Image (tube, grey):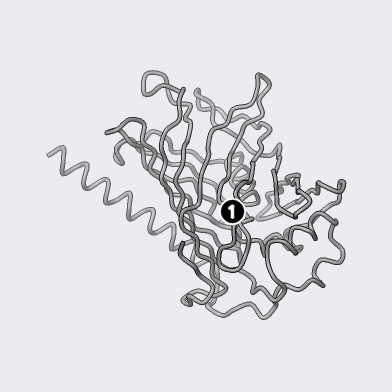
């Protein structure tokens, strides 16, 4: 009987994840391709390091990316509830992530192995302007079911930070604006569904994003409360995929009063992007 319950709840969890991915796809709108393509003329009013980034990461004439799907593997550190699992040490993670750019949205679905035969499965998502964190032990025992205004905001910061995987979403628009800081830094502000978040991007001379820092991201504390803290993302191992340059490795770090806490190092193992849904001309598999 226990085995049947586990199988049933595992299947239901998988179906729920699939439904959320479908929601991401639906936010892309129709299947047509954007008429507007990336042009160097789009850059003339942008800060110099941002111009350098766009010229580095994609060619002129690049179609606007509507949808992106990636697979990742790597390591994750968890601050778990006392008595469940140690908060120390890195845990192996395998994930799939799906993004839409017409309306900002994503689903990150993952397995995290706490021990060889112990895992949690769940998601972190931003859909319809709402963020959500949901995790189950053995895919059936709910450990985390969390949302709210702070999670909405934090999820939108993540969308901004990971826009390097769909860089046309970082072009200036009615939602996104850039402000100059200096020759290596520029501030991006993203507005969506009454949420406003920002991050300071750091660029190297080549045009690669080195880091992004934000004070708008939140983390869940052991007592269930939410703390808004400084966060930094580090971008490494830039390579070409589907004709654009992306970082294959992204590290996430909390910058806390007591020191830094690195909690995720994820490597892209598979990458696809689409300028239209239902077509594969914009995709690649590596």
Tell me the crowding category of disc 1: few under 14, some 14 to 19, or many 20 or more residues within 10 angstroms, Cα based.
Answer: some
Residue 224 vs residue 252, the one in the foreground:
252
Answer above or below: position of 53 versus 148.
below
Q: Position of residue 89 (x, y in %)?
A: 45, 25
Quadrant where the N terminus lies?
top left
Answer above or below: position of 264 versus 69.
above
**Which residue is label 1 attached to?**
129
* Residue at disc 1, secondary structure: loop
Rendered residue at 43%/63% (across/down): 22
Q: Is residue 146 left or right of residue 194?
A: left
Q: Position of residue 122 (x, y in %)?
A: 40, 44
Rendered residue at 70%/77% (across/down): 36
Residue 183 vs residue 108, the one in the foreground:
183
Total tally of numbered discs in the picture: 1
Q: Position of residue 191 (x, y in %)?
A: 71, 54
Question: Which quarter of the picture shows residue 65?
Answer: bottom right
Q: Is residue 31 left or right of residue 178?
A: left
Rendered residue at 66%/37% (across/down): 232
Answer above or below: position of 281 versus 80.
below
Rendered residue at 64%/42% (across/down): 234
Q: Is residue 131 left or right of residue 171?
A: left
Q: Position of residue 156 (x, y in %)?
A: 62, 49
Residue 259 vs residue 15, the one in the foreground:
259
Residue sitting farthest toward the left: 1
């Amino acid at each position: 009987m226990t085995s049947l319950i586990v199988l049933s709840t595992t299947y239901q969890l998988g179906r729920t994840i699939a439904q959320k991915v479908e929601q991401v796809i639906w936010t892309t709108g129709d299947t047509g391709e954007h008429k507007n393509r990336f042009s160097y003329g789009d850059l003339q009013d942008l800060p110099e390091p941002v111009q350098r980034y766009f010229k580095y990461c994609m060619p002129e004439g690049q179609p606007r990316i509507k949808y992106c799907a990636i697979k990742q593997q790597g390591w994750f550190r968890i601050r778990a509830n006392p008595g469940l699992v140690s908060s120390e040490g890195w845990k192996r993670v395998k994930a799939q992530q799906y993004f839409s750019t017409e309306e900002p949205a994503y689903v990150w679905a993952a397995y995290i192995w706490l021990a060889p035969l112990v895992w949690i499965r769940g998601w972190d998502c931003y859909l319809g302007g709402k963020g959500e964190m949901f995790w189950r032990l053995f895919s059936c025992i709910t450990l985390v079911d969390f949302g709210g205004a702070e999670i909405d905001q934090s999820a939108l910061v993540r969308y901004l930070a990971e826009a390097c995987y769909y860089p046309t979403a970082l072009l200036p628009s009615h939602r996104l604006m850039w402000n100059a800081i200096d020759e290596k830094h520029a501030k991006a502000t993203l507005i969506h569904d009454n949420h406003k978040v920002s991050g300071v991007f750091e660029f190297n001379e080549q045009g690669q994003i080195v880091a992004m820092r934000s004070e708008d991201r939140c983390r869940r504390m052991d007592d269930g409360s939410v703390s808004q803290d400084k966060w930094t993302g580090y971008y490494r191992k830039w390579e070409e995929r589907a004709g654009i340059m992306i970082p294959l490795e992204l590290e996430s770090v909390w910058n806390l009063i007591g020191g830094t806490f690195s909690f995720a190092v994820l490597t892209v193992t598979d990458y696809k992007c689409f300028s239209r849904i239902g077509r594969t001309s914009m995709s690649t598999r590596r």
